Structure formats: structure tokens, C-alpha cells
Image (tube, helix red, strand yellow):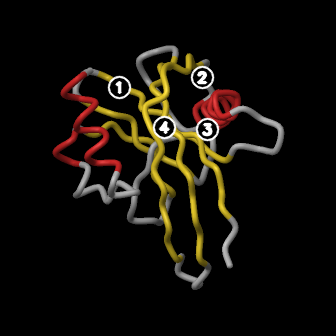
Amino acid sequence: MPSIEFIARAIIRRGDEVLLAHRVGESNTFLPGGHVEPGEYAEEALHRELSEELGVNSVIGEFVGVLEHKFTDREGRRYEEVNLIFKASVTGDEVSSVEGHLEFIWANPEEFKARNLLPSSLHGLLEKWFETG
């Protein structure tokens, strides 16, 4: 039985694009962020993860929603995630990874499917957010 992992993720927008993360060697993308550690609030975890991954200061904005995600990796391990999604902004116009296993790309909503953005239920949430701002 897989344990449930709590993940804080950021919607970082630049015009009509959203910042996506990509693990080197993998075919999918996801929103930047990471695990909420024991005793940590989700906003604190997200601020820490963005600093670790991008080396930037961030401002965590409003809570957007929760998405569950269940998947099995290549080795057959099952995972269950509860993704806590927040709007966020970062300092500076350019972002780049400070961790060798991650890359970051800007993508518009029309590219989400081609970039294999996971969880797939995120597409609708992001499209709605683009419409309402």
C-alpha cells in the first residue's frame, strides 16, 4: 500500500505561459514544487522548494486548489499524491535550475498535452485560471 505524499506546487505565470519542471530523462512535466515535510506548512514548503530548485526568492500567493494523483513508476512502485496548488511569483525574469536532475521550461496552455503535464487533471485547472486570471 503506497503512502500518501503531500506536495506543494506553484503556478508561476509569465504572460500566457506557465513555468513547468521536467526531470532529465523523463517524458513528463509538472508544476515546480515539492514535498511538504513533517511540521511544515504547505506555503513554507513551496517557498523552500522554489529556493532549492531555482535559487530565487518567491512570493507565495493564493491557494488555487487540490489535485490527487495516483501513478506507478517504471519499477512498479505505486504512489499517491495530494497536490496543493498555489499561485506564486519569483524574482527576476529568467529562471534556471540549480539542481542537475531538473530542467525548467515555459509553456502555454496549448502545449500542456504535448509536454505530458501531470497530473492530467491540472490542464483544466490551469485553463480555468488563465480565463479568470
Q: Nearer the viewer, mark 3 or mark 4?
A: 4
126 relative to 119 in the view: left or right: left
- What residue would you read off at disc 1? 13
Query: Tag on residue 56?
Result: 2
Q: Residues within 10 Å of mark 2 (few under 14, many from 20)?
A: many
Residue type at the position of mark 4: Ile
User: Which secondary structure, mark 3?
Assistant: helix
Instruction: Indicate the quadrant where residue 104 lies.
Output: top left
Task: Tell me whether circle 3 and circle 2 mark residues in contact (CB < 8 Å).
Answer: no
User: Which secondary structure, mark 4?
Assistant: strand
Query: Where is residue 94 drawn, in percent x and y?
Result: 43, 23
Tell me the residue at 33%/58% (across/down). Answer: 120
Q: Residues within 10 Å of mark 3 (few under 14, many from 20)?
A: many
Q: Nearer the viewer, mark 3 or mark 1?
A: 1
| Cα–Cα gap, marks 1 and 4 | 13 Å
Query: Tag on residue 53?
Result: 3
In this rendering, is residue 93 above or below 118?
above
| Cα–Cα gap, marks 4 and 2 | 19 Å
Instruction: Indicate the quadrant where residue 113 lies.
Output: bottom left
| Cα–Cα gap, marks 3 and 4 | 17 Å
| Cα–Cα gap, marks 3 and 2 | 8 Å
| Cα–Cα gap, marks 2 and 1 | 15 Å
Q: Quadrant of the C terminus?
A: top left
> Closest to the observer: 14 or 69?
69
Query: Tag on residue 85?
Result: 4
